[in-house]
Amino acid sequence: MSVDVETSHTLTTTGSPEGSTSRALIVALASAAAFGTSGPFAKELFTAGWSPAAAVTMRIGIAALVLAIPTAHELRGRWHLLRTNARAVLLYGLFGVAGCQLFYFVAVQHLSVGVALLLEYLSPTLLVLLAWARTRRAPSRLTLAGAAVALLGLVLVLDVFGSVSVDAVGVLFGLAAAVCSATYFIVASDEPQDGLSPLALSGAGMAVGLVPLLLLGMVGALPMHASMHSVPLGGWQVSVLVPVLGISLVAAAFAYVSGVVAARMLGTRVASFVALAEVLFAVFFAWLLLGELPLPVQLAGGALIVLGVVLVRAADGRGSLAD
């Protein structure tokens, strides 16, 4: 798999570079927004008595069920694509779907949410370092500057200095989530053999990611606790099905499919940095649904994240890894 997929193969079929890039950024931001709803939805499920493993399993299970029929239709007469792309599907399902979500939720049990998110979103930096190691060519100064600015903005948005709690176990799981997130972007942006579509990759990956969670739950390795109590959401008392469907349909099924589409159009590096916008959307949805207002420092951090993405995108557009 290539570490940074060029966008030229997409641009030749979708129109002008400018228009294609704009559409790709819109799709990537839509995916980030969808992923950003998972925090508020999950928080209400935890409040209602759900365990993180139960929430993750339900999220992936419903998404896999929803994507099953369109995935089967997409693969009709071409089931061999799963065999020829078995490695990508397995990596996507085990790391990008199951591992990333589960490790993050475990990290949250040991760390503050801000620190856990900060660790997970080290993935764009990991990808830059991986590209450096594989190509033996240093990233451009513009790329490094964009990475540094985006990470600084992420620190401000998460306001990690307000009440930081550090736990070695939590740090390890947070770093594991970052590795899984980086794997997700590598697999998602890679052009598969024989044209396995984003829908088919996401649908098959969901099914793959669901299997180990169910097995671990059945043997008692993962605590599975859930309840049907109503939950407060957006100032209303709603059925628990609202956050369950939200975290499954919006934050999983739509988010993952659109994420693959965006990653293939933008490439690994740019897509991973644009995905940092998920943090901004998470802050917004936390304010909208939970009444958690963003601080001025978080708004300043959001501006830095946008600037960092612009710098990385500019470096990518120049088509060079080194100055």
Image (tube, rainbow, N blue to C red):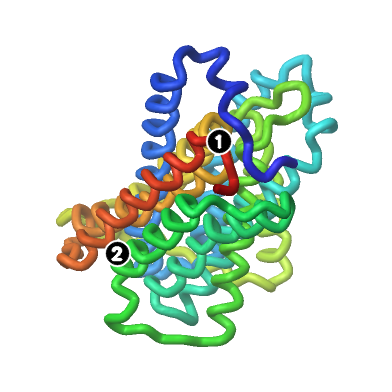
The answer to whether 300 appears left or right of 227 in the picture is left
Q: Is residue 62 above or below residue 149?
A: above
Whether residue 205 is visible to the viewer of this picture, yes or no, is yes
Which of discs 2 and 1 lies nearer the camera? The answer is 1
For label 2, the SS is helix
Front one among 126 and 105: 126
Extreme front residue here? 323
User: Would you name the residue on which mark 2 appears?
Assistant: 157
Evaluate whether residue 245 shows in this view: no
On the rendered structure, is 54 left or right of 158? right
The residue shown at (64%, 25%) is 197
Q: Position of residue 140 (x, y in %)?
A: 53, 50
- Residue placed under numbered mark 1 in the picture: 319
Residue 146 horizontal/vertical position (percent): 42, 54
Please tell me the numbered disc located at residue 260.
none
Q: What residue is rendered at 30% in x and 54% in y? A: 280
Say which amino acid is labelled 2. Val
